Each structure stands twice: as C-alpha cells, then as structure tokens.
Amino acid sequence: MTHSSVSSPSPDPLPSSLPPTPATPPLPLQGLRVVEFTHMVMGPTCGMVLADMGAEVIKVEPIEGDRTRHLLGAGAGFFPMFNRNKKSIAINLHHPEGAAVARQLALSADVVLENFKPGTMAKYGLDYAALSQANPKIIYVSHKGFLPGPYEHRTALDEVVQMMGGLAYMTGRPGDPLRAGSSVNDIMGGMFGAIGALGALIQRGITGRGQEVQSALFENNVFLVGQHMLQYAMTGQAAAPMPARISPWGVYDVFTAGDGEQIFISAVSDAQWATFCAVFELADLKADGKYASNNDRVRERPTLLPILRERLARYTAAQIVQLMAANKLPYAPIRKPEELFDDEHLLATGGLADITLPDGERAGQTTQAALFPFTMGGQRLGVRLSPPTLGAHTQELLLGLGLDAKRVQSLRAAGAIG
C-alpha cells in the first residue's frame, strides 16, 4: 500500500470539530438532540446515523468509559468507527446524583437511545415509561437482542443470532456454519433503529407525541435471510449454503488467473455471455447449444466451470481486468479491508473522511473512516466531530443544563460524574 491507514499528528492536527463552510446547507437533523445510552455496535450505529445527519448526539458513558474503547482484535475498530460526530459525557449511573443528572439530560432530548438488557434502564428511571411521563414528546429507541416474546430475556450477540437465524448456515460450507465477516446484524439493527426514529419524528410532527421504537438483532437477521425463506416457499426446495448453492447465473464465480491472483467474474445475461465468449476467444462454447441460455448454463455449471477455469488460467489477472473493464463486463478483484484506504474510487469521491483516533497507543493520530453510502443534495455526510475522548464534553453539557461550575465540581468530587 502506498497510503498509510494511520498517520502521526501533524504540526496542525485535525481539530475535534470541523465547522461547515458558509456555503454548506444545514443538515436535515440540525437542531435535534439525541441522548445515547449505548455500547458495542448496534446502539452506537443508530446514534451515528442521526449524528451524521446533523443531530447533536450525546454519548453517555460510565466514568471508566465505554469498554469498546479498549477492545482488542476484531473489536479494536468499534469505537472509532461508530462514534464520530458525537459528544461524550461521563456519568456514574450507579450513583443517585449521577442517575439524576442522566435523567435531566435525557429529558432535554428529542430522542433517547439505549441497548441494554431488558429492565436495566428502569432501575435508573431512564426507561420509556418514566421519561415519557415527564416528557410525552420524547422518542425512545431500544435496541435489543429480540423483540418482546419468548426469547426476549435471552442474551444475544451478532454471532448468536446469525447461528440461530440461518445466516451462518447460509454463509458457511455445508456442515460448517460461519458467521458473516462483519457485524451485519448489529450495524443493520442500528440502522433500522434510526429509520424507526425518523418515522417517529415525522409522526410526532403530526400528533405532537413521541413513542417507543424497538429494533432487534434476531428479527434483523430473519429479515436478511427472508429471501431464502421465500425461495423455499416458492420452490419447495431448501436453500443450500452459499458455497454449495445453485447459482441463478451460469458464470458467477471466483477464478484464478495464470499468475495466481484471484478475481470474481460474471456474465449474467445472454448478451454478456456472447461478449464474454468473444473477448476470451471462446467461440466453441458460444456455438455449443447446451450453453445457449443462462438457465442452460446454470444446469451445465459442473461441466462449464472447469472449462472456463482452464481457459482463463491462460491470462494474468491484469489482462482479465483490462478485458472485462473494456467490455463493461462485471468483475471484481479480491480485496482486503485495509486495501480500501487506497481505493481510487473512494479517494476520488470522498468516501473516506479524516478522523482523529481517541484512544489506545495511536490516540491523537489521524486516519480515515468510511462514510455512509449515500449523498444528500449531491454531498456526502461528513465528519464534524472526531470520535470523542472520554468525558470531553461533560463540563459543557452540564453547564448547558443549568448547573453551575461549583455544582459540576461537587458532582465530580462525589464520583457522580467523570
């Protein structure tokens, strides 16, 4: 790679807050306050969606900090990825005065987010029933493992619901269930929570009242495999795991080029098949009637794919890419996540934005994070605030609630805030 994913602080480091230029139009959720009692991935994703769209999102952390700040291995990217554009306040909910401050903060919000076990928030008077009684306009988004029902008190993780919800079965080889290579249910569950919040905001504009929204990992996973459920309903045949599935396309697979590099190649229509055969000098296959239509090629995949593998091995990966691209045929190199820091399309289109790392050995250094994959008014939703350091905005936020500096100091001395 030519680009370093993490760089040392420059003499003029990235500021924690990047003010918009005068020409920047207001973001759609500007002026909305969100208070977030969340951890891990699901709840923080919901908060990030609202934050990226302009809301003031306040992350309430325990005084020792969200534990995802210091996870190792596959969890190391959780906090910096899902907590940009947020403010951090450190509150000890176990302290009566801390819980009282948290309730005051929550009641100042338009939207409250949480993703703790059922009953946890009620212990602190931070559940929907308590908050909505004091503020009927509040919108309360709960992120759970399961929606209310027989499973609701089970402990859920992304991997748990992937296993019980059919996704791991579909991803792995037969007899070898495998979780997907990203926190798909956590991320999408948070996104569905944000969609619910946006719908509740529109309805509040009509009725004047808020409501509770619930999003759940298991139900999200079932939605993801819903197409396979309906495949069975339509055909009477159970969907096979993806590595063993009957592909709907004749040419739709990973091939190894002559130089050993792998590349995904497809030809999903009869027109693409004709072009593919012309480009790679496969006139004999094009003339063979048993490969005439896509469905014919699907039925003949056991004989067709070995032939294609042998023929394509005569080309280097670079030659295959050049020929596929020149003829507008679908293809993809096999990339690793870290290689995306150098992706020419992401760099050219602003798909990555600078952030300052808040924690760990590389705290204070600059890297880039992926933005949401859509534009509004032709613009990507960018980074206004880097992921916050623990409690970076505690003083500011409590003063904004009307507490004076002496009161803030006494709360900190009592261990109610960090």
Image: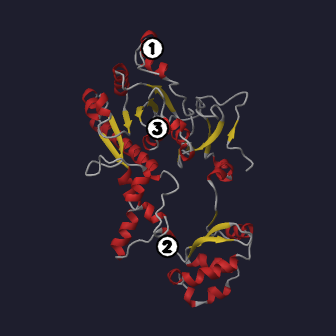
Residue 228: x %, y % from top left: 40, 67
**Callout in the foreground (3, 2):** 2
Q: Amino acid at mark 2?
A: Ala
Camera-side residue of 98 and 45: 98
Residue 387: x %, y % from top left: 55, 34
Q: CA distance from mark 1 to mark 2?
A: 61 Å
Label 1 Cα crowd, 10 Å radius (few <14 / some 14-19 / many 20+): few
Considering the numbered disc 3 on the image, is that residue within a helix, a strand or a loop? loop
Q: Is residue 83 visible?
A: no
* Res 28 label: 3
When asked about the image quadrant of residue 77, the answer is: top right
Q: Residue at x 35, y 45 (%)?
A: 144
Q: Amino acid at mark 1?
A: Ala
Label 2 Cα crowd, 10 Å radius (few <14 / some 14-19 / many 20+): few
Task: Determine contact: label 3, label 2, CB under 8 Å.
Answer: no
Question: Does residue 117 appear left or right of residue 9 in this picture?
Answer: left
Q: Amino acid at mark 3?
A: Pro
**Callout in the foreground (3, 1):** 1
Q: Which residue is mark 1?
A: 413
Considering the numbered disc 2 on the image, is that residue within a helix, a strand or a loop? helix
Q: Residue furthest top?
A: 406
Residue 233: x %, y % from top left: 33, 71
Q: Earlier in the sequence, mark 3 or mark 1?
A: 3
What scheme was used to colour the molecule? secondary structure
Task: Determine contact: label 3, label 1, CB under 8 Å.
Answer: no
Task: Determine contact: label 1, label 2, CB under 8 Å.
Answer: no
Label 3 Cα crowd, 10 Å radius (few <14 / some 14-19 / many 20+): few
- Asked if residue 191 is positioned above or below residue 326 in the image, the reply reads above
Question: Does residue 133 appear left or right of residue 226 in this picture?
Answer: left
Q: Which residue is mark 2?
A: 244
